Structures are given as structure tokens and as C-alpha cells.
Image (cartoon, rainbow, N blue to C red):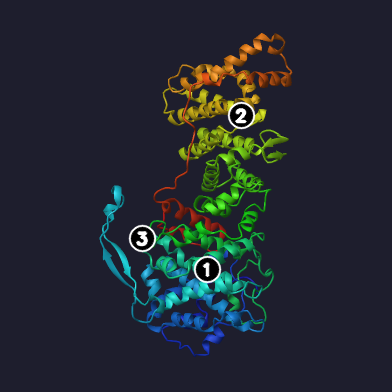
Amino acid sequence: MGAGPSHGELADNDCLLRLAGELEITIDDPFWDTFLTFSLNPPISSQDDKMLTDRLKSICDSLVINNRNTSNFKTLIRLLLQKTNIQQLEMNENNILRFQIFNGLFIARYFLKYLVQNTKEIELINQFELQTDLFVETSKNYFLIDGIEVALGDRKEYAVPDDINETTSFKFISLLVKIVSELKVNDFTYSIHVESLNCILIFLSTQMYTIQPSSSLIIYKIFMENIDPIILSKALLQKYIEQNKGPDISGGSIIFGLASNIWNILTLSSNNPTNTNQSPLSSLSISVLLVLVNHCTSPPPPKGNPYRSCISSLSENLITLYKFLGDNPDAPLSEEKTLLLYHLIHCNNNFKSFLLARTDIEVILIPLLRTIYNTQTSRFQHMYMALIVLLILTEDQLFNKTVHSIILKSITWYQERMVSEISLGGLIILVTTRTAQFNLLKMRDKYLHINCFAALANMSSQFNQLHPYVCQRMISLYEVLSKTFLRCPNQDMSAIEEALRIVLEVINSCLCNQLIHNPNLVYALLYQRKVFEPLKSHEAFHDVIQNIDMVITFFSAKLEKEEELLNSSDVTSVLARVQHWSLQWPRDLMKKFPDLKFKYVEEEKPEEFFSPYVWSLVNILSNISFESTLYKLS
């Protein structure tokens, strides 16, 4: 198999030229047996895929023109429909049949990709049919609320025929779904599963190359209204969890036993995947599932997105799913796992309740916190989704209480300071305060620090036995923000002012509700009392600082009465006395503030964020090279 050919070699290949030529090839022509029986190493990286896409461009140029007269592409699809038999594909003796199905899907994938990126969806669909157009364009006036896009005028929509189930395009999509849902995965069928998912992703990628909403696209209507979402969702999720890496293809062909000089030219130069730890089938499965879940999010379909409904109602094998999500505690939570976890806890009450009831919730939380901690290396959207997951969890008061009872040993990835023992709740505070400070002073994204502080605020009334370093970091965050606020009086400091207020309210909430259980926080306040002086009289903060100052004054007076402790370096003795004096603390003297409660609410049009985000993730997970210069999805 050697290096790949030049563009010219591929463009001059006799079989490809005949397929794309002006003459019709009937379904019983011996050509197809030759054409579909070959051996190749399929592209195993997006670079390889782009190389092959470029080499096939001239062939596709001709095929898209001539196919309307020859129907050669439709004949190829008809052959796939005829030959694909699930039981026969699973039988060991049917090697040739598997070769032909895989190769047919492979060729179909590249022509589909060309159509998606270079023609309208209507042309893509009609390339599957005979010379007549079953799908026709209709004009429809539309208006959008709040003045958005009203100037776009008329848009095109497509009239879908009543007998869509009889169209070749629908039958082909149904075949792909049938393979994914019913065909057993083993070394012999693995490549067929991969190519089927590649084809599905290519179909769905029509959204990236149009300004049309996904709910108006024919492809999405088929998947949302004419495909069984329960069967497909479960199959995709199962394949994602199984992480089946398939046969070893390094150094040879994925298909064994046959070789044809005609098709050896498709072998590409790369023989080894760039990341052998990834399962191609798993990555493609979660890609398809996330695309389906995150499109058509505003009805239609009649009852909303059916794939979201499947995720929302999932109630089986939750323990398996939970263990899979947390199967790598020594690394950040992967991006696709984070997004799946978001949908599970946001939409699925069964899974959320199951998760919150776990006594080993750190299995998922520690990788999630590592994602948030990696502020400078995590993709922004990844960190944002991780923070939202954390925020949703902190809406539950039992969670906020439980995390302080889980003690962690030696968190080596937290590099600011070696902490030998800390509660999970304390680690959450360290990570979120660090992220909020970094964002406020460098990244300056409004929603990022708001989510950090919202999670802290939700937890604050349940802070318990906070580690001394955790208390120090909270007060240090306040000090840094207050100095920034006072240093730039003539600049817009609204974000810093808002953050300062929330930090003070978090400290105040802990003192009002859990002072007796947090002697280290009282000690830190006494030790750093001077940092609160500059803003004591500021109108935006004085009411909250007044409460904090009341605590400082009370315990300072107690210390002064015991002169031997006032300047003592014996922290243990001082903490013991603080604990004792806490029993005498007149908490009723403090000004009452409303409970700090923040709740995550998904945007009214979630697709505006999730659709571009999911496709950016698909670009990472799949080995498909999507032509970014043609994107219309912003």
C-alpha cells in the first residue's frame, strides 16, 4: 500500500470516471462487483480526509452534473439497500459482502460531503432520486421577534412529499440507522459501523452550510419525525460507553483478503491514528447523539426534540453510565462527557437524583473541577459547561452539605499550594475563587465569573469546617478585588463591584448560618481585619461589611481580654477559644439578608449557543474535515 497518489492519478481512474460519466450503469452491470471489491486504508485523520476530498473533487464535479441523467449514484445506493442484510453481515463467511457494503458507504460518504458543502440541501436530496424532483422549493414569508433578521425577507422551504418513506434518500438514512442500531459490533463489522456514522454526520452537517434553522431542513425533519429516536439514542449511547476500539489497522488494510490495483490508489500516507487511545466508533457515536440533541430545540417537532426527550427519560443502567463518566479520575472530564453530563443533570431528574444520592460523588466532581481549574488550557466553552454543571448541582442543599463531609487526600494537580487533606467542598471553593479571579482580571467574560460566584453563593449557607487555606483564599480574593476597585475609580468597575458584593455576601452568609462550624474563617477575619477598612463606608458594601465587622469586633474584644492569646503564635489555642466564644455569639444582632439562591435557566433559544459549539466539538472528535471557509453557522 504506499503513499497516496497525486490528484491527477485519482482524477484519471477508469472506474471513477465511468461512475461520474455520462453513460448510465445499470444495477446488474458487472462493473459494480469490480467497483465495490477493493482494499484500502480509509482516512484516519481529518488531514487525510481533506487530502482525499481534494483529490475526488473533479470526479464529484462531474458526478453531480451527470447523475441527474444517469442516476448512477442512486444505483449505488440501491445496491447498498439490496445487499445489506444484518444477519448475513454478522456471519463470518460473508467477507465479500462486508467489503462491498463498507466500500459503497465509503464512496457515498465522499459524494455526500461534496453535495453538502457545494450545493443546496434540495440538490443533495434530489441526487438520490431519478430524473424527477420529488422535493421542491416553496417561498414562505416569515418574521422574527425583537427585530432579529427581519430584513432577510423571504426564505426558501421545501415541500416534503407525503410518501417520504418511499424515497431513496429516506431509505438510505433508514439503512444507516438500522446498521447503527441493529448490527452487532465486532472486528468484522466495525468499519461498517464507522462509515455509517460518518454518513449520518455528513447528512447532519447540512446545518453548518445554511442560514436555515435546523427545524426547516429536510434531513433534520427525517431524523426528528421519521426515525425512531429511542432506538437510535440508546444505540449511540451504548456505543459511546462501550469504547470499542475495533481491529488494529496499523501497517495494513482494514479489509483483508482482497486487493485490486484499481483501488489501491486510495491508500493514504498515514497508517497510524494520531491518538490511539480514542475509540473512533465511540467518538462518532457521541458526536451524532450530541448533534441530534442540540438541534431543533424550539418546536417543531410537535413535542419538542425527541432525542432530548430520550435523554430526559433515561432511567436504565444509570450506575453503568455514572461509572463511565467518572472512569478517569486522574484527568479533566472530557469535553463530550461534560456536555453529556450537562444534558443528563439539566433534563433528566432520574439521573440528577441518582447522582446527588451518591456517596462517591467525587468520582465525577474531581475531574469536573480539574476542567474548571485548567483555565488557560481548557476551551472556553468546555469550562463554561463545567461551571454550569457545578452550578446546577449546588442548587441542591443536600449536595452542599455532603461535599463538606467528603475528605480528599493529596490533590496533586492543585499547584498553588500543597494541601494534604481538604474537603471536597473546600476544593470547590478554591477552584471557583481562583477561576473567578483569573476571569475578572484577565479574561473578563461576564457569565464565567457570575457562574463561579453563583455556585459559591448557593453553597455558602452550608460551609462547614473550612480549611484555613480555603478561608485565606476567600479573603484574599476580596482583597485583590477591592484594591482593583479602589485603584481605578474613573473606569467602569461594575463587574468588579458586583463581584465584591457577592464575595462579601458569601462570607456573610457563612457567618450567619455556620459561624460555630467555621472557626478558621473567624480566625482569618481577625488576622486580615484591615482589608475591610477601605470599603466600610462605601454605599455599595457598607451593610454587608457591617455584619462582618460586627463579628470581627466581638471576637477581637474577647481576645483582648485574654492578653496571653492576643499576640500568641499558638494557632491551636486561639482556635480553641474562638470555638468556645462562638457559643456566646449573639447571631440575632446581625442584619438579615435574603438567602443566596441562584438557579440555572437555559437560554430561550439554546440552539444559538449549542449548535455552533457542538459542531466545533465534532471537528475535534471525528476524522472528518469540514470545509470551514464555507460555514454559514455562526
Q: Which of the two labelled residues, at mark 1 and mark 2, occupies the earlier sequence position?
A: 1
Spatial separation of the CA atoms under disc 3 and disc 2: 48 Å
Q: Residues within 10 Å of mark 1 (few under 14, many from 20)?
A: some
- Tell me the amino acid under the disc marked 2: Arg
Residue 209 in sight from this viewpoint:
yes
Q: CA distance from mark 1 to mark 2?
A: 49 Å
First reached walking from the N terminus: tag 1 or tag 3: 3
Name the residue beneath numbered marker 3. 212
As drawn, 442 above or below 178: above
Tag 2 residue: 473
10 Å crowding of disc 3: few (<14), some (14-19), many (20+): some
- Mark identifier at residue 231: 1
Quarter-wise, where is residue 548 in the image? top right
Rendered residue at 44%/47% (across/down): 602
Helix, strand or loop at label 2? It is helix
Q: Name the residue located 67 percent from the left edge and 54 percent from the top edge.
A: 327
Please state if 395 lies on the left or on the right of 272 as rendered. left
Locate residue 263, reporting x and y percent: 58, 79
Q: Point out residue 198 in the picture as x, y percentages from the top left corner.
A: 53, 68
